[in-house]
Image (cartoon, rainbow, N blue to C red):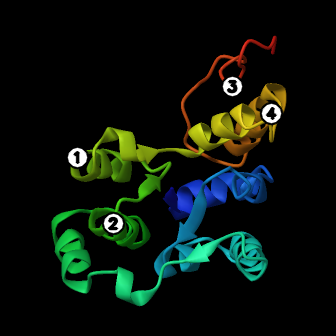
């Protein structure tokens, strides 16, 4: 599966040190659109570029983006350009979309369908399911995301656990 991550989710994953971990999810290609990379800030963008150089993150190519559809979405919605660019790509291909932006998530759910939309917390949960993280690590990562300013829901401390005691 190909998964496009927006800036909010990439920044949250970078802030907790798990962007590289989610790039190890089995059968998953992580991709970012050009505008998203520019929205990430220096530290996060540097990590993304290093992961790209290592072949672990892919960049969306220009031909994958419909400029007409992108501009249509920009005119109709007050959502960040990176989110709209990612949604545009996901609309024309069977890709999943990861966002931690509430407005982008609502729009993407309407346009793509709920099964194709997720947030960074689901990526942490998938990382636990793939044995890339322990549930206690994922919960500590979630708390780190929130302490760095991530707008995330309140979770029980066993949210990420699969039969483990948190």
Lower sequence index among marks 4 and 2 = 2
The residue identified by callout 2 is: 93
Q: Residue at label 4?
A: 140
In the figure, 121 relative to 23: above or below?
above
Disc number lying in front (2 or 3)? 2
Residue 26 or 148: which is nearer the viewer? 26
Height in image: 130 above or below 56? above
Say which of 74 and 159 sits in front.
Answer: 159
Residue 160's tag is 3
Q: Secondary structure at mark 2?
A: loop
Q: Quadrant of the C terminus?
A: top right
Badge nearest the viewer, 2 or 1? 2
Which image quadrant is residue 75 in?
bottom left
Q: Residue at x 40, y 67 (%)?
A: 86
Disc nearer the start of the sequence (2/3): 2
Badge 2: how crowded within 10 Å, few (<14), some, or many (20+)? few
Q: Are marks 1 and 4 in contact (CB under 8 Å)?
A: no
Q: State the image coordinates of residue 115 (x, y, percent, origin top left).
A: 37, 40
Taking 30 as reference, is 82 left or right?
left
Looking at marks 1 and 4 on the same chain, the residue that comes earlier in the sequence is marked by 1
Q: Residue at x 34, y 80 (%)?
A: 65
Query: Dot 4 lies on which element?
Result: helix
Q: Nearer the viewer, mark 4 or mark 2?
A: 2
Mark 4 → mark 2, Cα distance in angstroms: 34 Å
Q: Mark 3 or mark 1, which is nearer the start of the sequence?
A: 1
Say left or right for 150 vs 74: right
């Amino acid at each position: 599966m190909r998964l496009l991550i927006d800036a909010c989710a990439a920044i949250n994953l970078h802030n907790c040190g798990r962007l590289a971990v989610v790039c190890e999810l089995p059968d998953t290609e992580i991709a970012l659109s050009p505008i998203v990379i520019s929205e990430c800030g220096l530290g996060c963008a540097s990590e993304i570029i290093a992961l790209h150089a290592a072949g672990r993150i892919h960049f969306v190519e220009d031909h994958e983006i419909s400029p007409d559809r992108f501009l249509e979405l920009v005119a109709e919605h007050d959502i960040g350009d990176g989110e709209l660019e990612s949604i545009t790509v996901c609309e024309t291909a069977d890709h999943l979309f990861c966002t931690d932006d509430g407005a982008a998530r609502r729009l993407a759910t309407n346009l793509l369908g709920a099964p194709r939309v997720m947030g960074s917390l689901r990526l942490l949960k998938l990382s636990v399911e793939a044995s890339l993280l322990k549930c206690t690590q994922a919960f500590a990562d979630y708390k780190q995301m929130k302490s760095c300013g991530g707008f995330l829901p309140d979770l029980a401390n066993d949210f990420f656990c699969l039969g483990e005691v948190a």
